[in-house]
Every structure is written in C-alpha cells, then in structure tokens.
Amino acid sequence: MVDPNIFRAYDIRGVFGKDINEEVATLLGKVFGTYIGNKGETLAGRDVRLSGEALCKAFSEGMMDAGCNVYDAGMIPTPVAYFGVVALKMDGGFQVTASHNPPEWNGFKLILNTGDTVSEGFGMEKIKDMATKNEFRLAEKKGCLKKIDVLPVYENFLLGRFKPERKVTIALDLSNGAGCNFVPKLLSKAGCKTIAINDVPDGNFPGHLPEPTQETLQHLSHLVISSKADFGVGLDGDADRAVFVDDLGRILPGDVALAVFVTNLDKKGKVVYDVSCSSFLKKVIEDAGCEPIESRVGRAFVMRKVRETGAVIGGEKSNHIYFSDVYGFDDAIFAICKMAEIISKSETKLSEIVDKFPRLPSIPIISFDCPDEYKSMVVKELAKFFESKGFIINTIDGMKATSEDGWVLIRPSNTMPQIKMTAEAKTEEKLKELVKLAQEVIKKKIEELSGR
C-alpha cells in the first residue's frame, strides 16, 4: 500500500524505509511509464542521498516494465535533469531527490517532455490515484537501460552563454550535495576563481543539512569576507537553489537576488514573483521597465507562470530563480554564472547594488509543525481570524493578510508536515506586533484542530 501523503504539491517525498522503498519506487516507475504512454526515451538522474542509487534502479525497472527506455545519467544536479530531458528531446524523465530535506528523506521529481514537472493540478492527482489503486499498464516489450553522460552537453550550453569581463572570485558552500563535482570545475572553465567548502558529495550531509539558511551559511559568510570574494553562493542538496551572499557577508533573500537580476536584464519583459516576496520588488520590476506578475509559491507554479506568460525571468523568496534562457527552469548553476557575469561587468560591488533597493523590515520564514491532514483546515481558520480583525485576505497561496502597516503570509508547506509563516511591516515595532499576533494564533489553531 502506497502512503498517499508522499504525493506533494510538486513532487513525491517521504522517509526512506518508512514511506518510500524500492517496491514503492518500482510501482511509481510503472505508473509514470504508463502516464507518459508506455513508450519513449527517458532520463534518470539522482542526487547524493544514500538511498538514491537503489531507488533510481527500482524506479527505472518500473519504467522499463512499462515499455520505456531509460538513460541513466547517474548523480547529477536537478537542473541538469530538466535540461537533459528538453535539450535531448526525450519523452520524459525523473530525478531521485528530496532536495533540502534531511538525509533520511528521498523522493522523485517526475519530468515531462516539456521540462514541466508533474505537480498539483497538473497530473499529480492522477499519478496518486493510479499508484494508490495499483493501476498501470505493462508493455509487451520491456524497455532497455543505457548509460548517458549529459553533463558535457549542459556544460557546453552554459559556457556558450557566459562571458565574464574579468576574473570574479566566488566562495561556494556546496552542502556536500549534487553540485560538488561539477560546479567548481564549470566556474573555473568560465574564468572564475572559486573557494569551496562542504565540497565532497556525501549523502549524510556532514557539513550541515542540505538547506542553505541564515544558520547553515554563517561559515560561508565569514569565508566571503576573509577571502575577499566578490560574492558567495550556498547550494541546496540537489543544486536547484542558490542563496547568494554579498561581499560584506550578508545573506540575500531570494527577492533581493531577483531584483539584482531584473535590474541587469538584457531584454525587458514580464517578471514573475511569488506572493511571499517583499513589497519593494514590484516597484523595482516596474522601474526596470518590466511588468510584474504575482504567483503562488512553489517551483511548478512559478515555472508554469513564467512559461505561460512568456516572462523573461521569475523568482521566489526561497531563492529559486527561473530563466527563460534555460527553458524557464529554476537553475542555481545558471544563476551563479549570470551573477558572475553581472558583477564582472559592474563598476560597483554586489553590496552596493543591493543597498540601492528600498527595504522594509521583514522576518525569514518560520515553520510550525502541523500534521499534513490538518494544514489546509488550519490556514482556512487563520484566514477567518485575520479577516475578522480587519485585514484584507488574499488566498492565491495559503492566506496573505494585509493591513496598512504590513502583511503576514501563512501557507501550508508543499514538502513537509508544516505551516510556514513570513511577514513584513513598515516599521520594526509594527513587525514585532504582527509576528507576535500571528505566532500566537497559528499555535492556537494547530493545537485546537490537531489536538497537539
């Protein structure tokens, strides 16, 4: 029996040995192979997690049972899997990864021939229904397994698009993840100097959890300053997310990084950003001669909005950046190269570029444990509460409550049994008041509804 809770908003995730195992992986392979038509050429990739190789093999077996040929790319960053499917004109693919989750977790990103991923509202419900009902179709002729090296194709693609005008020094925290073997070599070939930490791939993630945060990137911040690097970058476990650190060692939120890219676009156009981004970003986008478009939080939603609207770039507060130049994917490696090019051409430092943006007091995302089955109910109750207090409610993603003094966004996590909150206000005092109110009512509603 497949646990229905492993089917998330934009991927499949669970704890290995508890929610996900080889048997589940093989079933999911059969289901996905059936979903894409029981034929065709597909790409298989994985990150560094210890269960990755076994799960990749098991999922591949299921795909082959369903009639698909599988090209095993081995350990690759997730953006390379997206790129490989589209650039090599494959019929689909999958990446075994749990991104930034703790080491005992693993999962699958299911990639369609367009580079889109199966997600909530775009196939995930069907995949979930087929898997929980054990519905799939086996092919008369089993597919075959082949090896493929997609990294050189991706490397050539990137190197043909970036021409730094001077040698840029970049400090890297690779989180012992899938970017370790590839990213420093690529940047060196592009003419950059790199200084790296946590640069040995290890699914135990000995340096820190594979999520680049204020806490985990403190060492990187000090390294940027001590090495006099132009900037620093922290990658997550599968290298689809880059958190930038300026030359003063300050960790930049994703909306600030997006603002840097927007003010240095080669062409103007539409810019997609998620509802958790700061209010200043909309003005920066408009001042750059671009059109701002708001989106729900999450890769599948932002990427789809970038593609649907023909946007030149998109971004999330969580530091996923989506470039039309690379098929609209969120690609941390492309983002690093682009930032290096921007800094190489600029007469000002990254910190000076950043300091030009108007900023409002805000808090990083705060997470509250909440069982999956109660998350939506909790958010609905919170919307009622804030509306009763005179806030204007936006439900594009979770619940965003706005007043004259600021806003608070409360939404269910797409990947974990958690409720996430962030907030922004005109003053530090107003921010403290808003955060205190929100924290108290979130904890109260979770306790009331779940009994915790």
Image (spheres, grey):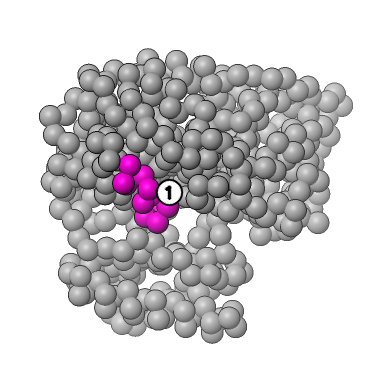
Q: Nearer the viewer, residue 358 or 2?
A: 358
Say which quadrant the N terminus sits in: bottom right
Q: Nearer the viewer, residue 351 or 286?
A: 351
Q: Residue at x 55, y 71 (%)?
A: 370
Residue 401 in the image: above or below residue 326: below
Q: Residue at x 58, y 53 (%)?
A: 102
- What span is in magenta? 213-223
Q: Residues within 10 Å of mark 1 (few under 14, many from 20)?
A: many
Q: Is residue 130 magenta?
A: no
Q: What is the x, y in percent for residue 110?
A: 62, 39
- Quadrant housing residue 29: top right
Say which quadrant the C terminus sits in: bottom right
Give the labeled residue for mark 1.
Answer: 212
Q: Is residue 216 magenta?
A: yes
- Quadrant housing residue 277: bottom left
Q: What is the x, y in percent for residue 109?
A: 60, 41
Q: Residue at x 79, y 33 (%)?
A: 61
Tell me the SS state at disc 1.
loop
The single residue placed furthest to the front in the displayed view is 226
Judge whether residue 54 can be spotted in this image.
yes
Q: Nearer the viewer, residue 168 or 122?
A: 168
The single residue placed furthest to the right in the displayed view is 140
Q: What is the x, y in percent for residue 311?
A: 33, 36
